[in-house]
Amino acid sequence: MTRIEAVRYRPVLDSRGNKTVEAEVTTDSGGFGRAAAPSGASTGEHEAVELPVEEAIAAGREHVAPRLEGREFAGDQRGVDSALHAADGTEDFSEIGANAAVATSMAAAKAAADVLGVNTYQHLGGAFRGRNFPTPLGNVLGGGAHAEDATAIQEFLVAPTGAPSVRQAVFANAAVHARVKEILEEDGVPAAKGDEGAWAPSVDDATAFDVVAEAADDVADEFGFDVQLGLDMAAAECYDGDEYAYGDDRRSTEEQIEYVAGLVAEYDLAYVEDPLDENDFEAFAELTDRVGDETLVCGDDLFVTNTERLQRGIDEGSANSILVKPNQIGTLSDAFDAIELATRNGYDAVVSHRSGETEDATIAHLAVATDAPFIKTGAVGGERTAKLNELIRIADEA
Ligand SMILES: C=C(OP(=O)(O)O)C(=O)O
Ligand SMILES: [Mg+2]
C-alpha cells in the first residue's frame, strides 16, 4: 500500500465568507485528495472544538503532518484518524482543532480513493455500496441562528419521501424552494435568504408552516409523489434553562413536548430535529415515546455525532435518529462509528452539512458509503448543490 507523502494546509473561504481550513494529501504513488472543513452557527455545547483558522493550520503543520508523512498508509483510514487523535491528545480536538482534523481526515480518504482508482464512497463503504441513496432533507425556509428577523424555528425542511430516485428527490426539493418564493411574493412578503440558502422572511412560524405546506403539496401534485415536511427546531438555542422561547411564545418543557406532538400530527411531519434542549435526554425520551412511531425524532446538538452520547440516548430511548456531522466529532472514523452504532440500534442516520459550507462533497460519499437513509444538505446554492449534484452523479455511475 502506498504511503502519505505530504499533507498541506491553507486558509480558504466558506459560504459565509469566513476563513476555513483546507487540507491536501498526496501519496508517494501520485494519489491526491483535497477537503475543507465546514463550520456551524447553532453549534452544540458538546461538539469537538473548532479553533481559529490560523491556529488550526499551524497545529496541522506542526503536529499532524509529521505524524502522517512517510508513515501512514494512505488507504488505512482508521490509522490516519488514530494519528489525528494522537497528534491532538484531548477528548475534543481542542489542541489541533476539529477543523484541522476533519479536513485532514476527509482529504486522506479522497487521496486513498484516488490511489485505489475508485470513488470515495466505494473506498469508504466497499464494493457493495452504491445501490441505496439517501433521501435529501431540503431547508426551504428558516431563521433562528441562520438569519436575522425571520422565523423562530431554525429550519423548515422538505422530505420527498415518495421520490423514485435521488435525482427526482433533489429536483423536487429545489421546486419546493422556488414555489415557496412564489407564494411569499403572491402574499406580498419580501424574503432574502439565510445562511443555507433557505428563504428567510419576517413571518411567524404558523405562517411559515402554511406557506411550506402549500408549496410541498403543489410540488407533490406536480411530481406525482409524496413530499412531506420536517423541522430543525434547534431547541438548545431557544432554551434558557427554564423555558423555551420561540418568538413571543414561551413554553415549559411539558408544553414544548405537547406543542411538537401537535405539529407532528397537524403537518404529518416526517422528521423533527432537536425539538428539546441538548442536555434533556429525558424530555427527548418522553417525546419519542409519544410520536416515535409516526416521525423521526433526531438528535443533533443532543448527540453531536458522539458514540457515548448516542449510547446514552439508545439506553434511555431518547430518539430514533441521529444527525451526523463529521466536524462535530473530528474524523470520518468517528462519524462512521456513530452511524454504525445508530444503525445497529434501529436509529436512522442523517448525514449533514453545516450552515457554513464549502464546495466539498465528502458527505455525499459518506452517506452512500454507509447506506444512510437521509442526508441534510440544503436545497439550493453552490455549496449545497455540490453535495446534491454529487449524489446525482454517483447514482448515474453506480
Ligand atoms: C446545520 C445546522 O446548523 P449549524 O451548522 O449552524 O449547526 C443544524 O443545526 O443542523
Ligand atoms: Mg440542527
Image (cartoon, grey):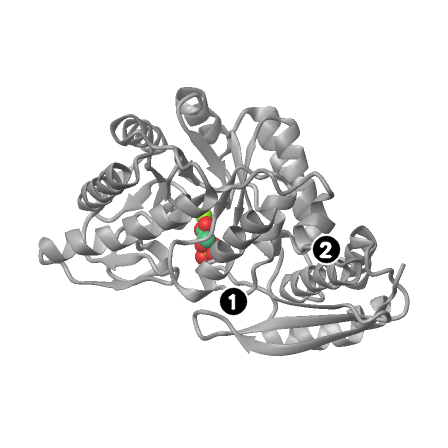
**Amino acid type of the residue tagged 1 in the rendering:** Thr
Residue 228 against residue 388 in the figure, above or below: above
Mark 1 and mark 2 lie on one chain; the one further toward the N terminus is 2
Q: Measuring 62% from the left and 33% from the top, which residue is drawn there?
A: 342
Circle 2 crowding by C-alpha within 10 Å: few under 14, some 14–19, many from 20: some
Foreground label between 1 and 2 = 2
Quarter holding residue 158: top left
Quarter holding residue 181: bottom left
User: Which residue position is annotated with label 1?
Assistant: 358
Q: Nearer the viewer, residue 254 or 350?
A: 350
Q: Nearer the viewer, residue 250 or 41?
A: 41
**Amino acid type of the residue tagged 2 in the rendering:** Val
Disc 1 element: loop
Give me the C-alpha separation between circle 1 and circle 2.
Answer: 23 Å
Q: Is residue 356 left or right of residue 2?
A: left
Q: Measuring 30% from the left and 35% from the top, which residue is drawn there?
A: 224
The x, y position of residue 172, in whole percent, is 34, 46
Residue 370 against residue 363 in the figure, above or below: above
The x, y position of residue 36, in whole percent, is 60, 67
Query: Residue 225's mark?
Result: none
Q: Measuring 49% from the left and 64% from the top, which residue is drawn there?
A: 357
Judge whether residue 210 can be spotted in this image. yes
User: Which residue position is annotated with label 2?
Assistant: 118
Residue 319 against residue 307 in the figure, above or below: above
Q: Which quarter of the rendered picture does the N terminus lie within?
A: bottom right
